[in-house]
Image: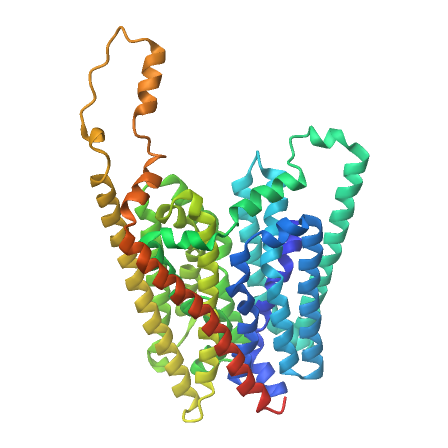
Amino acid sequence: MELTVLIPFSGQNTLGPLKSQLSREKGTTNGQFGLLIAAFALNSTWTPLVGGLFAARLGTSLSSIIATSIILTGQLILLLGELSGSVKTMVFGMFIFGLGISPLAVVQETIIVRYFKDHGLGLSLALGLVAGKSASFISARVSFPLSQWSPHAPFFASTFLAGFSFTVNLLYLWYEKWIAGEIGAEADNSGRLSEQEALHDVTSKRKVQLRDLLSMGDIFWLYIGINIFCGFIWTPFPHLAPNIIEHRYGLSEGKAAEQSSFLLAGSAFLYPICGYITDRVKKRSIVHRLLLLSSVLTLACYAWLALPPTSTGTPLPAMLSFGLGIGFSPLLLVIIVPHLVPLQYVSTALGAHKSIESSGSTIMQTLAGLALDSKSRTSSASIQKVINAFLTLNIIQMIGVFSMMKFDQFRQQLLVEQLPQYEQYEALPEDDNVEPNSLEVSQELQPLDSRRPKRSHDMIVSPAERARGKVFFVTSALLIAGTWLLFMTSAGIEFWSAKT
């Protein structure tokens, strides 16, 4: 069931290797292709903020039907647009497709939690992430070979997989109801969570309280700022890379698609390794250092591509470097959150993280397409311009990651200095005559590590920080609104003035 839920997520990755084909056969401009990809991420600028509310109100069964139906509908509209040669219809299909992603993610996590709550939950969630990334790599790898057999084949394949996912979802729901009716109480005693319990467990973790954003301090807003630049440099590039390296290095479409597919290969094995390292190394600085390493790797990719192609000869080292850098960095943006905010704020922080990162991705994807369509350029000059933009944004992102690491170290030192005075006193020697129960009471009075983050956080977030938080909150809201305005304006210019 987990794999079938993840199958539709790979559909968007079939488009990148087909950019040249779409341009040649349908007259798709770079700007229109950018809007086609951006349409998928556009709804992710707001759906993470409602978290599990949709699933909590409707229940897992109805939510899964609606989510998979939305994705299948979007895929069918995309296929219809491709068959009719209407890029506008394809963009609308991707927009509908993206609308079902967040609810489906809640359903998938609910199913995993329900069956693996007490045994192997972490491994099961990790396998879910790896399955999704592997599906993305496979779809990017096979889309161009399929297009050589038939130009419509990649779109029919994606639609078939979306329909297959929808059908298996119906079978799963039927099986659940049948099992519930057949074995009844026996299932309740099997140690498995009920649907309602699993759904509550998941949706409570995805619940977003926007007012909590004002209480998270400067370190959180620095993290949010980094997310914007991560959105700029991470998600758009794999969709643009096949076309960029094809023209910059004179590769065939097949060779460019093959080499650019390595951009998505790293996550399949780096996610588990990264999770293992962060679990084994208990120092909070390891997450910062790994995130900084990922910035260096993606920067190396853009620096390599920015050099004259005559001096580098091949884009493969850049593709491998980016694949390694992006192979674990999205996971780090999630792992680092509990180190920056108290546990009760984690779900809100994660919702804001995904929303802002998607905004950055949508903005960059749209602007990159427009830049490649600039009338005052040659093809090589426009590509150089986009690569230089990626390189500059990556440098800013790396500076932000380094600054966050130093800021977090300073903040932790400040928190230690602000601990209550009694924690600085030397413990009195134990009395041999003290009863064991008294020792337990005295230990309970000692400051516990688990208590420190919340108390320390309350002490460090000053009224001035909360005031700045209001400014950052409004700025973030304007960023999301601006993302929609940019997309709608660009779509109007591209499609209302075009013949497609």
493 left or right of 356 in image: right
**Residue at 70% over, 31% down:** 188
- Answer above or below: position of 388 versus 10: below
The answer to whether any part of residue 120 appears in the image is yes
Residue 152, percent from left and from top: 69, 76
Q: Residue 153 sits in which quadrant?
A: bottom right
* Total number of numbered discs in the rendering: 0
110 left or right of 318 in image: right
- Can you name the residue that lies furthest to the bottom here? 376
Closer to the camera in the image, 467 or 229: 467
Residue 179, percent from left and from top: 77, 38
Residue 475, percent from left and from top: 38, 67
Residue 254, percent from left and from top: 56, 76
**Residue at 21% over, 29% down:** 422
Q: Residue 192 sits in which quadrant?
A: top right
- Answer above or below: position of 262 versus 379: above
The answer to whether any part of residue 253 appears in the image is no
431 left or right of 158 in image: left
Q: Residue 9 sits in which quadrant?
A: bottom right
Q: Report the colour scheme.
A: rainbow
- What is the quadrant of the C terminus in the image? bottom right
- Can you name the residue that lies furthest to the top here? 433
- Answer above or below: position of 413 versus 431: below
Closer to the camera in the image, 301 or 110: 110
**Residue at 67% over, 69% down:** 74
**Residue at 64% over, 69% down:** 96
107 left or right of 350 in image: right
- Answer above or below: position of 200 versus 489: above
